[in-house]
Image (cartoon, grey):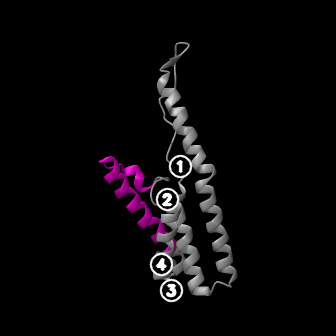
Amino acid sequence: MNSWEALTGNRLLMSAVTGWFVAQVLKTLIHAWVTRGFDPERLIGSGGMPSSHASTVCALASASGKLYGVGSPVFAITAILAVIVMHDAMGVRLETGKQARLLNQILDSFKTLEGKKLTEEKLKEFVGHTPLQVLMGAILGILIGLFMA
């Protein structure tokens, strides 16, 4: 078996990658529907509905639970990883996005400061997730992990 076959035959890895991919596609479609416009950055960007972070780690954890049992060390590691990632997405990263949004508004209100042009580069606002976005990503990931394992 060559390396490619070994990678694609790894059900844990494929569950996680599929969880990420499906969430990113859904996120892009939902964002396009809500904003009435396509933004290709949504295909790879963070933030938005559903959480691809939550989908990825929950697909990994649920697949590991199904394949190795919920009493296995593999499931314990992946479940704890999922909790940490989802907590971070709703905590620090969500607050970072709120701060970026506020700073962008401040920068927009001041075009120049003491005759010097302020930076034109906006801070990234889509970095965190609301609890609902994380929940939807988690449900999506769990279903994908159970189906693929």
The answer to whether the residue labelled 4 contacts the one labelled 3, judged by CB atoms less than 8 Å apart, is: no
* Distance in Å between CA atoms under marks 4 and 2: 28 Å
Which is more N-terminal, label 1 or label 2?
A: 1
Q: Quadrant of residue 21?
A: bottom left
Please provide percent x and percent y for residue 124.
Answer: 51, 42
Query: Looking at the image, is mark 4 or mark 3 nearer the viewer?
Result: 4
Query: Looking at the image, is mark 2 or mark 1 nearer the viewer?
Result: 2
The span shown in magenta is 15-44
Callout 1 amino acid: Val
Residue 140 position (above or below residue 109): below
Q: Residue at x 49, y 35 (%)?
A: 122
Q: Please give the residue where the numbered disc 3 appears in the rendered image.
A: 1
Which is more N-terminal, label 3 or label 1?
A: 3
* Distance in Å between CA atoms under marks 1 and 4: 29 Å
Please provide percent x and percent y for residue 96.
Answer: 59, 44
Q: Please give the residue where the numbered disc 1 appears in the rendered image.
A: 127
Callout 2 amino acid: Gln
For the residue pair 9 and 120, the one nearer the viewer reads as 120
Please provide percent x and percent y for residue 39.
Answer: 36, 48
Query: Looking at the image, is mark 1 or mark 4 nearer the viewer?
Result: 1
Q: Which mark is residue 143?
A: none
Magenta residue check for 146: no
Secondary structure mostly seen in the magenta stretch: helix
Query: Looking at the image, is mark 1 or mark 3 nearer the viewer?
Result: 1
* Disc 3 secondary structure class: loop
Q: Is residue 148 left or right of residue 86?
A: left
